[in-house]
Amino acid sequence: MIKSWLVTLLLVIGLFLPGCATTIGDMKTFVDTADGYQLLYPNGWVPADIKGASLGLDAIFHDIIEPSQNLSVIISQVSADKKLEDLGSATEVANHLLAKMNESATNKGEISLIDAQSRVYEGKTYYNLEYQVKFPDQRQRHDVASVVINKGKLYTLDVSAPERRWNKIKDSFYTVTNSFSVY
């Protein structure tokens, strides 16, 4: 009796598992073994050439159809003994990063923090941030980011799209930021 129940349960699970993987099925995996991180990114996105890019920019991917939808990974050096929590809470780190972005922006826009959350994955703390940028010409962008420190490096993943596209792609963007991990 228990054996037949177990076989039935395994059969049902086997039938439904492929359907549960559709979100992941719409994603590809990117692994950077040299810099020690990995992430999922949407199908239909391609890597961009980063030769001559700013210092610390490690990867860029963009949508082939909507190139203004993109993701980037920036790696900065920090003290080897630093932990993300040493920099402050998720909100404090978000406000600091947004202030830095405001200082360095060539096309000044108003950046507003929407949300800042902390998550722990495999013993490492990640801060997931969501913010919006409003430019003087009325354009708006929506970004989600994930920040983590590992082995003396501060990793920042940022995924960005025009605000008009946000409702269509937000679930994919959350999947990307939650998939980001360092090792």
Image (cartoon, helix red, strand yellow):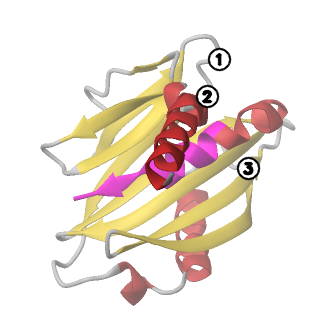
Give the residue number, with chain letter if any, for mark 3. Answer: 133
- Is residue 106 in sight in this rendering? no
In this rendering, position of residue 181 left or right of residue 103? left
Crowding near the residue tagged with mark 3, few <14, some 14–19, many ≥20 C-alpha atoms within 10 Å? many
Image quarter (top left, top right, bottom left or bottom right) of the C terminus: bottom left
The answer to whether 167 is drawn above or below residue 109 in the figure is above
Q: CA distance from mark 2 to mark 3?
A: 14 Å
Residue drawn at the location 39% of the way across and 43% of the way down: 39
Which residue appears at 53% of the width and 29% of the height?
18
Q: Are marks 2 and 3 in contact (CB under 8 Å)?
A: no
Residue carrying label 1: 66
- Left or right: residue 30 versus residue 100 is left
| Magenta span contains residue 180 | yes
Q: Give the answer, above or below, for where 133 lies relative to 63.
A: below
Q: Nearer the viewer, residue 106 or 125?
A: 125
Q: Is residue 7 above or below residue 26?
A: below
Q: Residue furthest left?
A: 34
